[in-house]
Amino acid sequence: MVTSDWTERHRPQSERFLEGNDAQRKKIRSWLDQWKEGKPDKPGLLLIGPPGVGKTTVARAVAADMGWQVIELNASDSRNAGAIRKAATHASNHGSLFMTPGTKPARTLILLDEVDHLSGGLRAISSDRISSIVTGEDLDPSKALKGDSGGKAELLNLLSQTKQPVILACNDEMGLWGRSSSTWRTARDRFSKHLITIRFERASNEALRRIALRVIKQEGYTADPGAIDELVNNNPGDLRALVRDLQVMCTLADDNLTKDMVRENIETGVRDTTVEIFPGLDLLYRSRTADKAMMAMRSLDKSPDDMVAWVSWNNGVVFTEKPAIRRGSQPLSLADRLLTSRFRNTAHRSWYWSSNLSGLAASVTMSKPVEGRIFCTYPGFLRRDSAWVKRSVVDRLAETCGCSKKAVREELLPSLVAVQSENSDDFSISLALGLSPEEHAAICGLKSNLVSTKKLMELYSKELEKMSSENVLPIIEEVKVEDTEIEETEPEKDSGQRTLF
């Protein structure tokens, strides 16, 4: 006997059973009502929000109330250009098959879930090739489309030609635009011409409690009040996860859920719970207690090195209070120093504390909760293809300093860029390293296509020519470490213990 999935069994089939995101639901309903009279200016919606908050459920429930059909594609389906055209584009250009004569035809809602996992760029596949694949005329395996080939371009084609409402859903819109620093804005602008963006929030504790009680009652179980509180307080606002947890616990229970049973399930399951970095950072920055922050940190499953980088990069953007930035910098500085002892006998403690300190630096340093949308970004100095992380600069620094390229990218370049971005007309470091004009502009964080940057590069070129004419070669002083005696001290008996504050 196969156990049914409770998340599908208890998925609301009507808007009246939905919980949370009331304002977002009203916007969706208003947009769908416009389709009764004709095609709106923007024929698509982009629903953005963390997993499990009901993005696709809302769309399907509202469409069901209106008597509309739904055609759905998600990440588990083939989503290359041929698959999207076959399943969605054709349907979007035709009316519904089921209609009553003399009445306006019902619409067909095209729903594409998890579009942030749609890989590839915006390069289109030829229309003839797609048509031959869709009709099955071209059976040559070598010409078959692989992966998501042409998927994004066909999605744009769908949005530009559709005669039916199209809803896209994702957790992180940057996955749809693409993370390349040079192309994501182009992709965003092209999609935004056809889309209205609606952002979903995590479910409130009251909404979670009502859903939990309804599911338990419909399944014929009971629960202690403390059990529901424990379940709700340890849920990050994920409706899907709530129902799945209930299914697991009800399977183990006789007929009643207890607080101890819920707590044991949470402690067992938390080790296997991971979330993507941007939703996880959103949860971390909204945490108001150390316990909540630690739970968010564990769910991110990032190393302490990475967490120090991510938090230090984003604190200055997320925090609106200067004192909070200063308070956050103190534990981050200490966490960074602790990481240097990872290969000593204090490694286990330093690893633990540096990770926790990063979480606290992002969560409890603000005097009031973070409000509105949180705009976290990928740390520029961790990107291998960032504009200023030119391979030639990395190679030059690694050779000059005698360190690894990773150390250059993560430790030297951030400091160098911080110095040069404020002093772009100071050529001394770049000349000493023998950098080209383009490389100097790169470490200054400047865009090469700007007029001001080109003028700066001309000045730098003149300085290089002057040095060449005067026969002056760049000089990098060698740093010699003199032989000195280092006093060895015996470790304390409680090795690894360190005063943190």
Image (cartoon, rainbow, N blue to C red):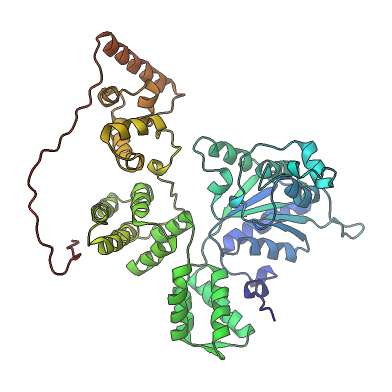
Spot the residue most to the right.
Answer: 101
Q: Against 482, is 362 above or below?
A: below
130 or 290, which lies in front?
130
Q: Residue at x 68, y 49 (%)?
A: 44
User: Residue at (18%, 66%) from the top-left corner?
Assistant: 495
Q: Is residue 397 above or below residue 48?
A: above
How many marks on residues? 0
Nearest to the observer: residue 194 or residue 391: 391
Asked whether residue 479 appears in the rendered view, the answer is yes
Where residue 76 appears, as percent x and y from the top left, is 66, 58
* 45 sits left or right of 330 in the view: right
The image shows residue 260, relative to residue 164, as above or below, that is below
Q: Residue 61: where, in percent of width, then height?
A: 69, 65
- Where residue 479 appears, x then y in whole percent? 17, 33
Q: Could you tell me which quadrant the N terminus lies in?
A: bottom right
- In the displayed image of the protein, which residue is found farthest to the top? 469
Q: Quadrant of the C terminus?
A: bottom left
Where is residue 159? Give x, y as percent.
70, 44
Q: Residue at x 19, y 30 (%)?
A: 478
